[in-house]
Structure formats: C-alpha cells, structure tokens
Amino acid sequence: MEYVRMKQPAGDRMFTISNYTLLTVFFLIILYPLIFVLSASVSDPSAVVSGKVWLWPVKPNLMGYEAVFKHKLIGSGFLNSFYYTAFGTAINVVMTLLAAYPLSRKDFYGKNAIMFLFVFTTMFSGGLIPGYLLVKDLNMLNTVWAMVLPGALSVWNVIITRTYFQTAIPPEMLEAAQMDGCNDFKYVWKIIIPLAGPILAVITLFYAVGHWNQFFSALIFLDKQNMYPLQIILRDILIQNDVSALMLSDIQDAARREALRVLLKYSLIVVSTLPLMLLYPFVQKHFVKGVMIGSLKG
Amino acid sequence: MKALRMTSSSTGKTFPIASAGQKIRRVWQLYVLMSLPFLYLIVFKYVPMYGALIAFKDFVVTRGIWGSEWVGLKHFERFVHSYEFVKVIKNTLVLNFYNLAAGFSFPILLALSLNYIRVRWFKKTVQMITYAPHFISTVVMVGLMFELLDPRNGLINNILQAFGFGTVDFMGNPDYFKSIYVWSNIWQSAGFNCIIFLAALSSIDPSLHEAAVMDGASQRQRVWHIDLPGILPVAVILLILNMGYMLDVGYEKVLLMQNPLNLRTSEVIDTYVYKVGLVSQAMNYSYSAAIGLFKSIIGFILIITVNQIAKKANQASLW
C-alpha cells in the first residue's frame, strides 16, 4: 500500500483529505454530546442551567451523583434490573441452545417444519393485545415471569446459534461419538456446550443488553413500584419529569431545585449507562462476531 | 454405492429406506431437547395468534375468547373509517420510509469512508466512539435528547443562541418530530450498523484493488466500481430484512418521544394500539386487537412481496 500513497494523484489526495475531514466531523458529532453529558453531570447546577458548560466541567462537584445515590427508587431499580437481566438471560440461553442444536442436525426428522414454525413467528404475530391477555390469563401480571417468559427465545438468535453449530462443529465429531456409544444428551452436554463458548458469549450479550434496556414489558405487565426495573424509573424521571420521584422537596429555593433537577438527570444518564459502557470495550469483539455470524445466510 | 451410503453413518440422509417412525425413534432425544422451546413457541407465539380472533368478536373477558360474540369485520371497518386512520397510517409509513432511507444509506457511507483510512489509531478511535452510543438504552437516549433539545437550557439551543439564532422548541413542534427521530437513530446506530458493511468490504479480493491501481484508477473510481458492487449482495439482503420488518421498528422510542404537542405527526399504529387497548379509560380489547392485526397482516404482505421482488430481480432472497 506504501507506494500507492507515495504517488497519489491529485484527485486521490482530494479524496483522502475530504474523507478524513468528513469522518472527523462525524466523529466529533458523536463524541461531543457524550463528553458534554459527562462534564455537565459533574458541574455546578447553576452553571449547567445557565449554559456555561460547553466542553469541560465548571466548578466540578459530585452533587448530582449524591442525589442519584440517595434516591431509593434508583437503587431498587438497579437491583430489579440486575435480577431480571440475570434470570431472563439464563432462561434465554438455555432455551436457545435447546432449540438450536436439534435444528442444526441433518437427521432431525421434521426439522424443516419446525424451522418454519419458528421463522413464521418473525413474520406474523398476534399483536400486543392478545399477548397481553395471555400473560394476564396465565396470572403472570406483576410477577417476574411476565418479565422473562414472553421473550424467552429470540428466533434470530436461534438461527445464529444453529448456523454456528452447523459451520463450526465438524459432523465427524458426532459420528465418532456415536461410534463410541454416546447418545444425543451426552453429546450435547460433553461436546456441544464446551465447544459453544464463542456463540454463547455472543447470544448472552445480545440477550443481556436487551433485558437491561427493556422497558415496554415492565410498562404493560408491572404496576408495583417496588418491582420496577431501572428503565421505568429512568423514564419517570428523565422523560415524564416526575418531580415527586425526584425527592428534592427539601430544597426550598425553586430556582436551585430546578437546577439540581437538571443536574440529577445528567448524572442519572451517566450512572445508568456506565455499566454497559465500561463493559463495552471488552465485549465489542463479541458483538462484532455476532453481527458477522448473523449475516451468514442460514 | 447405495448400499454404502446406507451403512455410512447416521448424520446425513443416509437411510433412504427408513420409515418416518424409525427416523423419529433414532433421534428421539433431539425431540426431548426441542420440547421446551416448542412449548414456548406454541404458548407465547401461536396462542396469541389464536387470541387475535377477538379482533372479529366483541370480546368480553368473562366469556372468554371463544365464547364472545362474532361481529365479523366491524372493528376493522370502524378503524378504517375512523378519524385517526389516515393520520396513523400515514405517520407509520412516512416515518419508516424516512428512517429506512436515511438509516440505511448512512452506515454504508461510513463503512466506505472508514475503509480508506490507513492511519490505524485514527480508524480504531473512530470505530470505538461511533459504536458506543448503540449501547445507550432507548429510555436514556430519549431522555438525553430531551435534555439537549430543551428550549430553556438545552445544549443545542445554547449553541443556536451563541450564533445569534432564536431558540427552537424542538420537541414541541410536530414538524420536527420525524427528523429528530430519524437523525437521533443515525447518531446512535450508524456506527454499529456499519460493522457488517466493513466486514463485507474486507472480504473483497485485494487483487481487484491492486489491478485497478495499476490501471490508474482513482480512489473514487475504485469505490464506485469495486467497493460498491462488492457490498451489494449484503446490502440487498439487509434491505429486504429492513423493509420486511419496517412496520415493527422503533415504536418504543416513538412512544417515549410523544407529547400532546407532537401527536399529529408522532402517532403510529403500534402506539395507537397500545393507547386504545391498554391506556385509555374506555379500554377496548377487540378494537385495539383489530388494529394490531391489521398491522400484522400488512407487515406480512410486505415481507412476502419484498422477498418475491428480490427473487425476481435475481438478487439474493431470504428463503
């Protein structure tokens, strides 16, 4: 590639310059709001509301974070979200493996029919109301089951996992195992699961991020405040501007209260997003891999 | 040859003379594995499809789905003739087409651009930062937009004021709703969505580029004649997928972005179903289910049609 750069014609130099420029602009458009939020969250409340924060924190302090951590609903929201995410993801992963392995086997009689039943549900659904009535009829409203069972399986992830089994695990392995008298249960337990590490990482991540960011199921299936996941609490504070949920009533000065309210929102955005963002550099390559496997036509 | 195949193994279609019963018995354990997912599929996916029958009935909770009275297409007619119909359908279609047009082309441009960056640290940094917003949840994303677009103390209005413009009430103006929705999506997901195109670009045979350089092709010509055709198959498959599921995307974000001022342009089918069925005082399950079913059917037709067109055009197809 070196010689290409050396004798770049004028047109190419223009191309390269404009390419770097445009990409830098796009990069800054993405980066600037992120930095701004981070800076605003540690700035002085009055500086934030009067627009004095542009890039770096003004009179740095941790007032917003203090307010966030004192807030008892945010704490319980975090705990509930952890619970739903861990429990829900565990169910998801087991179910996905159970469905994906048989579908990856050529000798699974009826494979195409079952596959059709799976894929059809991605194209057509009964809709929101019948789904809600079902959960209601099963007496799952206001229980953790409403949060984890209706989405216990994603057909896309089943397809990705099946494709992985088909392409990454050589069929000779099965023949050899069967020769040695290994049955299908044992084969899944001793061979498939130990070899499924990479795909397990991918689907665990997909499911976990989905659960963590989920708010709509909680909105329709839960109405007890002590069961709300973080996203519902966030919605009340960030979007519905629920002042009572903010618990700032002990501050008398209205302007100061308003300022602290804005500050708390910035801090809250940071606190709620940080766990995923911190995890992100480590999991990035898995996500990329997942997208790739998903792109294989299966 | 045939005899050989019969004895070879149990993996392939190797026992052409085995009956269905024998084939099932041989892999019975696979059916045991499949039983839970299968049960899930029936209960949580197919039972609601049966439940969608209430769209053709006047559903009374105490009488159940089957016991309620049939009313034919009454609810569908009511929806089609209702004051909301044109507005909701138009918003759904316009929002989704706008989102698809802008949201689909942007990641491709980004991937093409990144592909010509030779400075590794620059490329890595841009990728790292542009992928990051993908992990922000919808709720936080909309909350962030509200803060930044706030007419009194939001960052965007502060910038506008610094340059001598007046303040704009972005969320209160229905004309801005769709653009805010679409461009915030791009801000959040363009980076992540370009991964797949970068992968496609990296699988293009480098000798094509080498030959083109030898022949004196400029970078712009290489983008046009090598890179774009190279990612076309992937792009077509993704486009089919996106078009097929067009009506499904993003209603959670729409719901969160809605306020009384922008409802004129922000009410889409899914949010309307939610409000009619689960929020409004006069809850009407049947009517709401009918609207939902209406959308499911349109969506289904859309997927089938798009796939047929793709097949006809002799490009890739999904099945």
Image (tube, rainbow, N blue to C red):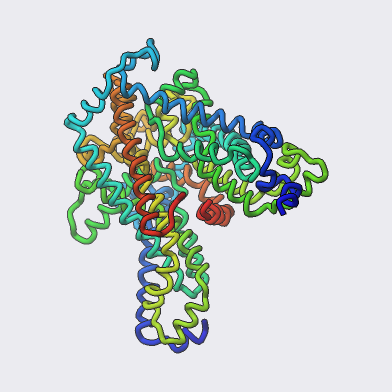
Q: Position of residue A102 (x, y in %)?
A: 63, 40
Number of marks in picture: 0
Q: Residue at x 35, y 39 (%)?
A: B251
Q: Position of residue B127 (x, y in %)?
A: 48, 62
Q: Position of residue A64 (x, y in %)?
A: 43, 42
Residue farthest along the top direction in this orientation: B62
Q: Residue at x 33, y 44 (%)?
A: B302
Residue B37 against residue B265 in the figure, above or below: above
Residue farthest along the right direction in this orientation: A180
Q: State which quadrant residue A88 falls in.
A: top right
Determine if residue A31 is in view.
no
Determine if residue A47 is in view.
yes
Q: Residue at x 46, y 25 (%)?
A: B47
Q: State which quadrant residue B75 falls in.
A: top left
Q: Residue at x 21, y 26 (%)?
A: B78
On the picture, is B31 further left or further right than A73? right
Residue A190 against residue B179 in the figure, above or below: above
Residue nearest the observer in this picture, A149 or A212: A149
Residue B285 against residue A62 in the figure, above or below: above
Q: Position of residue A233 (x, y in %)?
A: 42, 33
Q: State which quadrant residue A20 falls in.
A: bottom left
